[in-house]
Image (tube, rainbow, N blue to C red):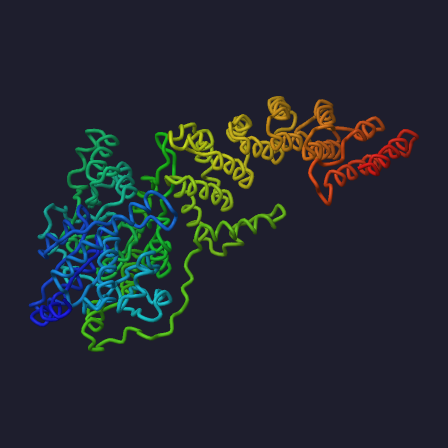
Amino acid sequence: MSARWRRLASRESRVLLSGGGTGGHVNPALAIAEEIGNRDPNTRFLYVGVRGKAETVIVKRVGYPLVFVSTEGFPGFRPSLRSLRFFCRLSLGVLQSFFILFRFAPKWVIATGGYVSAPVIVAALVLRAFRLAPTRVYLHEQNSIPGQLNAVLGRWVDRVLLTFPQTLSFFPKNGVVVGYPIRHSISPKVREEALGNLSFTVPEGKRVVFAFGGSQGARTINRSLIDALRYLLPHRERLFIIHGTGLARTRDYDAAKDTEDRLNALLSEEERGLLEGFYTRQDYFHNIADVYSISDLIVCRSGAGSLNEISRMGKPALLIPKANLPGDHQVMNARTMKHAGAAEMLFEDTVMEDGNLIEKLDGRVLAEKILRLLNDSERLEAMAVRTGHFLRRHATQRIMSELYGDLSYNNGAGSESVPFKPLLGNQRVLQLLGRTYAGADGKYDPLAAVGDEDDLVYYRHRAAALLSNRAWQDRNLGVKLIGLTLYREKIPTLLDMLADRTPASRMKRLFGGDYEQVGFIRRNIVQALQVLDQFDPEIERHLLQAMKDPYFEVRSQACIAAAHFGKHLVGKETWLDALLEALHDNCFEVVTEAAKALGEVGVDHRASDVLLRLRESHYWQVRDAALKGLKRLLDRGIVSPSVSLMSDMSSFILTATDFRPHFTIKETYKTVRNCCNERLAGPSPVSAETSSKEAKRERQS
């Protein structure tokens, strides 16, 4: 079989290309193929992709033979039904790739990422391991942080072709920095020539804004641009908007239909009539270089492909990075361009809309940013000049140097890698800010811990983006991070989630779930409100409702919040009644925290009387909390120290039912007793008698 492979390879050069899902993975493969074809016109190409994705449209238009394999996106290493389905489909894709490789017998396998590359690379590596395939395998990594599969598979391929120098730290043995390959067709054109190639007319003298979200489109950008049209319409005499909606046609999102429906819903018939000569849209621009060439400002995501194309075209950009991608590579890319003075940034936000949490960019904010940039010609010109420095030149020639081994470029093979310091992951941010908050002693500042204001702003938006995830663990993490980053603008969203009573699925209810926003999330929302330390009637209303939540930890945390916001709740009968009712809760954890909160909220003898009645509670934690509540009433001057009070307190049971080497309740009792003694004018026979009783009880315990 290896002999057949070599025989076919000797007759003609054969190259198998794989990469897809989005244009950001397809276009680099086509750029590499274009350069190989220029050097060796007799080369045969075969493209392996996934049916229904960007490669179906883009590759077919170019004219390369296209075959499909079965695979899907990697869901992560956490065991789940999705993980099982992924491995089943990957296995099928590997088997399909075996047959494709045997039949085509390529000299090189060139993969440009996306989950479609995985089965092809795995199959090629397995065949090589058994010496059945004398083929070389190359992997091009577009992003600064490789995806999980690329990070694993890249260790076994012949060369990993990198876009960014810092990515060398992930592939120190076989990584080379070549840059991002761009097709020759993506190059600046004379404006008149580009205008002549377009299927629509751009009125003379208008500034052109080109907004798109990649080959598949971006729901956030599409919707935000439609929302922005109303604010841009007054400037239609000097603006022209070109909108690339994307090719996405999935069950969850149909880019063209969603955009059309939103436009019809938001704009009146009269406003829609004003769009002619001001706004045009198309799902995908195959001649995107013409659109780039006439544009004064680009609004887009910050994937490596889009940014390198913009850099080659020398265009200023307003970037809207997608959050929570592997390694935050889009945010890292956007920050690199912003710090170079080549771009501006806007972040998505997560808001409650029609009862659902969605990622959104306010249309008014987008319109204002576009107008501000277009009104500053000097700024745009400076951004355009600096954009050109982002691109590593001659990427395709550098790749040819690696493929043909002619050493025409020094791509850094064997160079010492520099460890890359990316943005912190969500868990790392949680740990960092959690430690800082715990040691803040009332003076908490997340910026002091993070160290960079731009990073903190992004961490806040990234936390908000987690709130719309399907997995409750992600939403729970987002809630915690919103609190610790002090993202107070998200308080309304947290309150909506706290009050959300959407029932959990039947399967989740079988395992004890109640609502979609599970008990852990609701508890942590209450805790986040404490960290955010902002109080108003709306927050108070939701906290009062949380006192009756079906999950005991939420009720307990609501009592803790009542103690935290005690100065705002003092003397309010609704809260006193709620805490008195909580003392009869079936869960002693709730009773414990309610007793402490009474010490902060109580204003008369009712609070002290009910706390004293807890002296014989079965749970020592409740008795301890009652003493702490009494201590706070004494500190606040609500209860005055007296002989009768000390006599009543002497009846508290100071032992615990479980074995403990140290009884906290005894220390609490001594603290309260000493407080009373210090405030009393002097010892009395009764106080001495009380002390005698206490000494006797302590010896017995």
Give the image location of residue 418, x and y in percent.
Answer: 40, 69
- Quarter holding residue 527: top right
Q: Is residue 107 above or below residue 218?
A: below
Give the image location of residue 440, x and y in percent.
Answer: 60, 49
Between 210 and 400, the one lying in front of the other is: 400
Q: Tell me if I can see residue 264 in this picture.
A: yes
User: In the rendered view, does 261 fall on the left or right side of 569?
Assistant: left
> Where, quadrant-wise, is the N terminus in this rendering?
bottom left
User: In the rendered view, does 623 fall on the left or right side of 524?
Assistant: right
Q: Tell me if I can see residue 567 in this picture.
A: no
> Where, quadrant-wise, is the C terminus in this rendering?
top right
- Quarter holding residue 356: top left
Tell me what residue is drawn at x 24 percent, y 50 percent: 71
Between 524 and 216, the one lying in front of the other is: 524
Task: Name the outermost residue toward the right.
Answer: 685
Give the image location of residue 235, x and y in percent.
Answer: 25, 41
- Quarter holding residue 611: top right
Task: Name the outermost residue toward the bottom.
Answer: 407
Tell me what residue is drawn at x 12 percent, y 59 percent: 46
Between 652 and 618, the one lying in front of the other is: 618
Between 128 and 318, the one lying in front of the other is: 128
Q: Is residue 684 above or below residue 188?
A: above
Q: How many marks?
A: 0
Give the image location of residue 313, x and y in percent.
Answer: 21, 60
Q: Is residue 72 above or below residue 255?
A: below
Q: Is residue 92 above or below residue 102?
A: above
